[in-house]
Image (cartoon, coloured by chain):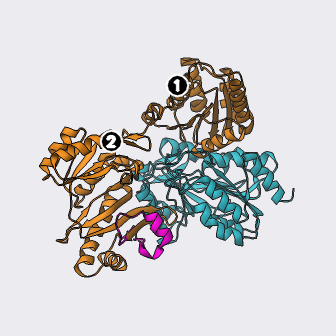
Amino acid sequence: MRLYEFEGKQLLQQNGIPVPRGQVATSPEEAAVAAAALGDVVVVKAQLLVGGRGKAGLVQPASSRREAGTVAAKILESSLGGQRVRSVLIEERLAIARETYVSISVDRLAGGPLILVCAEGGVEIEEVAKTRPEAVVRFHPDVLRGLRAYEALRVAKAAGMAGEEAASFARFLQRLYSAFCRMDAHLLEVNPLVATPDGQLYAADAKVILDDDAAFRQPFLQSHREETGLTPLEREGREKKVSYVDLEGEVAIMGNGAGLVLSLLDLVRHYGARPANFLDTGGGASRTKAKDALGLVMKKAEQDPRVRSILLAFSLSISLPEDAAGGVLDAVAARKPKVPIFAVVHGTRAGVGEEMLRSAGIEVFPSIQEATRAAARAAVSAEDRGPIGTALPSPRS
Amino acid sequence: MSILVDASTRVLVQGATGRFGQIQTKLMLDYGTKIVAGVTPGKGGQEVLGVPIYDTIAEARTEHPFDASVIYVPAPYTLDAAVEAIESDIPLVVVITEGVPVHDAMKVRALAKERGSWVIGPNCPGIITPGQTSLGMYPPTCAMPGVVGVASRSGTLCFEVTKLMIEAGIGQTSCVGIGGDPVIGTNFVEYLKLFEEDPETRAVVMIGELGGNQEEHATRFIAEMTKPVIAFISGKTAPAEKRMGHAGAISSEGSGVAADKVKALEAAGVKMADTLNDIVRLTAEALGR
């Protein structure tokens, strides 16, 4: 889960990382009050989950409470990358002696944490890494031992720091690394890390991504399940604990297995139609979960007039046919599907699942390819007959 | 021959007493897997389907030697279970559990490298050597003995591919689901090395997906391989910045894009399949059929 800057900073602060004083505002009036409390010389920062705020002019300085209000009013009316700005962070403006880039992320290939430091703050790190790789210091700490003080110091010196500056950066980096572990973070990016003229270090920006799989031990993730940027059906999928992603196409899809469903999306395209969604029930889904999942797909078919067919694919291993196919029967008994369903069942005791689906009048195919081709054909030939119903705006607009 | 496991592999099941653990233990026993003991803390002294259960691995070991462990414990306890297995120097540890936090997975991986255990998963269906043994939940109907090695990030997709292969009369030496998470115990390239060394494997099928860059990373080794590699990448039509089921199946800020993987693999001389049936056709060609 990606956090807003102000949420990320709150967590960092709780983990001993200094951040600038700041307040969140959702109106120009609140922004002015916040600026007054912070001593008038502030920065007004749009709170968004997409990058590129600075370039889009959504981070602005203000030197009086009145100006803060005016600037906030403008930013609060803006949007970026399809996201509307709903709040701004009003922060004290720091005196800057030096800016540094620091991030700690999960290096998937190496299978461990990766620290990146660049002596120039505020940079696009991917860009610098490409054009001047020598300017970026990389270090893989040992996840079992943690980041040693001398290792952190070595990183600081490699990034061009010296003396007391290097020592205080190293202490900051160690604290940041502890926070990375304690927060179950996928990414902590501080860009820039600001050193003030008196030598104090502050995380002036924070991009934080937490690991959803760690929700069982992270109170923040438990209290912040609502992720912005989700469509209503995606939110419902999250509540029902299935992986659902809205797409724009004619064939609604449900399956049990992420790779399986991913390949169905590609195959639907291969046969000339477009997938309407991604839905993976996950392994070992209960009958109720299977019912909920198909219910979600049927809802998609009802709400989105582009959807012309439903494709179901079960690969049974940890899932039982009584659960997977049983859930389908429950769902079609509860509400009649608006579009035809094309299904395929493979794996352990697949025959049982096939029979159950056929008993509900669902067409079952021997292979994924055949089922997908049939679902795609049904979608495309229906298209030829012209649209039915009234087109709704896409769920994301 | 095969990789990692064969008919002689003696298996410990961690979490055999849970609902899934019991179902899967039964399926493995039915397949012929030599399950010698189970471990569930607090359930020592019980039996599951004739398999004796112990509280700790140390206790199980005094009665029954084993070569591998399969872990079915819930995600919050997976780190503890895997650490116990690795620190007991079990050479092969198969972590089936889905939803393991990435920080735990990093620790498991680091510890395994330090102690010399081979970890498959987490979030995987395990490994099957058809006709001999199965560690995990590979459906028996989806594999048969043969000469093709299969490694896949996705379990269900792997089942489908090998099912199509056996319908075409093509069997497998071993099939392994390497795990769908961002950090897994062992990456593609290390399985490719095992298949390259296995005298009976004549071709390798690699099933990747969007997210990360281990497919690209494997290209250098593939270029040196004597055996043909057939690859398939799913998620070519997936939108960016969206987690597609697997925690690892996400392209982010331009990295992990499926189309880039296809390009990199093609450049390395890998035969790229466009559809599942294509995998079978290209594999048959590679075998000279």
Q: Which residue is mark 1?
A: A392
Q: Tell me which chain appears cyan.
A: B
Q: Which residue is mark 2?
A: A224
Rendering quarter of residue A138: bottom left
Residue A323: x and y in percent read 56, 31
Secondary structure under tag 2 reads loop
Measured along the vertical axis of the image, is residue A37 above or below residue A19?
Answer: above
Residue A111: x and y in percent read 48, 64
Q: What stretch of residues is rendered in magenta?
A: A118-145
Q: Amino acid at mark 1?
A: Leu
Q: Is residue A158 left or right of residue B139?
A: left
**Tag count:** 2
Q: Residue at x 40, y 53 (%)?
A: A52
Q: Tell me which chain appears orange.
A: A
Q: Residue at x 82, y 49 (%)?
A: B169
Do tag 2 and tag 1 residues touch (Cβ < 8 Å)?
no
Q: Nearer the viewer, residue A169 or B207?
A: A169
The stretch drawn in magenta includes residue B274? no
The stretch drawn in magenta includes residue A123? yes
Residue A290: x and y in percent read 54, 31
